[in-house]
Image (cartoon, grey):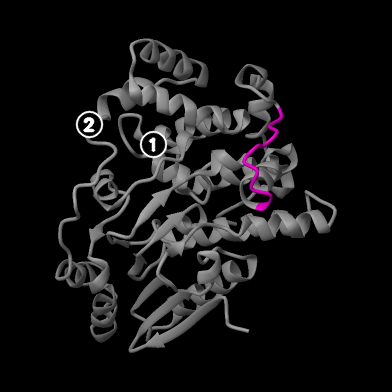
Amino acid sequence: MEEEVIFKVQNGVGVITLNRPDRLNALTFNMVKSISKHLISWEKDDNIKTVIIEGAGEKAFCAGGDVVNLRRQVIEEGGPPTELSRNFFYEEYLLNYKINQYSKPFVALIDGVTMGGGVGVSMHGSHVVSTEKTMFAMPETAIGLFPDVGGGWLLAQLSSGIGAWLALTGERLRAYDLLKTGLVNFYVSSEKINNLKELIIQEPSEKNEEITNLINSFSSKPEKMSIIDDKEDIIKQIFELDTIEKIFHELELLINMGNDFAIHTKKELLVKSPTSLKITLKQIIQAKEMSLEEDLEMEYRMVQKCQSSGDFYEGVRAMLVDKDRKPKWNPSSIDKVDDIWVNHFFESLKENDLKIKT
């Protein structure tokens, strides 16, 4: 049986290869623990200068956490909550923070689909390299969750309502828009990614600026494929509003004027979990004023409440297991999701809270 993650050290470079291409390199609990273990070890090793993370196969860097397998295991164990449902996200969020704080250059080669948990193990690093094959999304509201792994924090840093728009709708971005928003640092054509990797291995460095120079020697401008450029004003008009009700009201006004963007956006939002929409908007608004550490601690409270609320595992069932695409959300509509329900997702877990720094 092949390893789910392959770890190699080459000329002072630690190389992490996510190795589940048949599952779009989706992260399991064991993968999360193994990556954390190696990063801690490599950070202490003076012989390791740089870390690279990549995905096996032609399609994906990493499509997210393996929530299908998580759902199956948790149900088999009679939960949620179970030890796995608590520990999976606990360890994953600690890993996300470790990558953000890593003391050596951390180069993520996101040459393909990069969603959910894949964002968490790449975009918090010092050097995030996109290609023409990169496709970014945080589509969690479609499965009764919210943009986690610090992805909500990354989106909250974006201006003009773009973060809230991406978080609520799960819209997909390509390299041009990722560079424009600052979600990635670099663009290198896919055919040159292996050459870039080999050059970093030949010339490893503990200095971020030296790795930056190596990547820049391969970088170019991506094709202008944008879903943002001509919509910035209308995105701001809608998604800088501070409640879901106001967003839907604004959409209705625009729909009455025949606006195609509003028609499409309302259609997208109506299939999402009503609870997820409300907690996600609150998350994005709060995360704007938070550090990543504070955000991840908030997200852990949210994800534990999501697992016990029902929508998360129902969303996974409908979208990824049975694939009937007909989730039975509870509550079933926005007007039934009151503030008391929303606020409980943000309440302390007391002794079970995530503490990034202990």
Q: Is residue 262 left or right of residue 67?
A: left
Q: Quadrant of residue 171?
A: top left
Residue 117, x across and y down, in percent: 51, 56
Amino acid bearing label 2: Asp
- Secondary structure beneath label 2: loop
Q: In what quadrant of the picture does the N terminus appear? A: bottom right
271 above or below 115? above
Q: In what quadrant of the picture does the C terminus appear? A: bottom right
- Secondary structure beneath label 1: helix
Q: Is residue 132 left or right of residue 287?
A: left
Q: Circle 2 sits on which residue?
A: 230
Say which label, 1 or 2, has the lower sequence index.
1
Amino acid bearing label 1: Gly
Residue at x-position 19% and y-position 47%: 224
Residue 88, x across and y down, in percent: 65, 59
Mark 1 and mark 2 residues within 8 Å of each other at the beta carbon: no
Q: Circle 1 sits on which residue?
A: 163
Report the magenta stretch's main SS: loop
Residue at x-position 37% and y-position 73%: 52
Is 322 covered by the magenta stretch? Answer: yes
Residue 204, x across and y down, in percent: 27, 81
Residue at x-position 40% and y-position 70%: 58
Residue 176, x across and y down, in percent: 24, 49
Question: Callout 2 environment at 10 Å: few (<14), some (14 to 19), or many (20+)?
Answer: few
Camera-side residue of 75 and 150: 75
Magenta segment, which residues? Answer: 321-330
Question: Callout 1 environment at 10 Å: few (<14), some (14 to 19), or many (20+)?
Answer: many
Residue at x-position 47% and y-position 46%: 138
Comparing marks 1 and 2, which lies closer to the viewer?
A: 2
Q: Residue furthest front?
A: 324
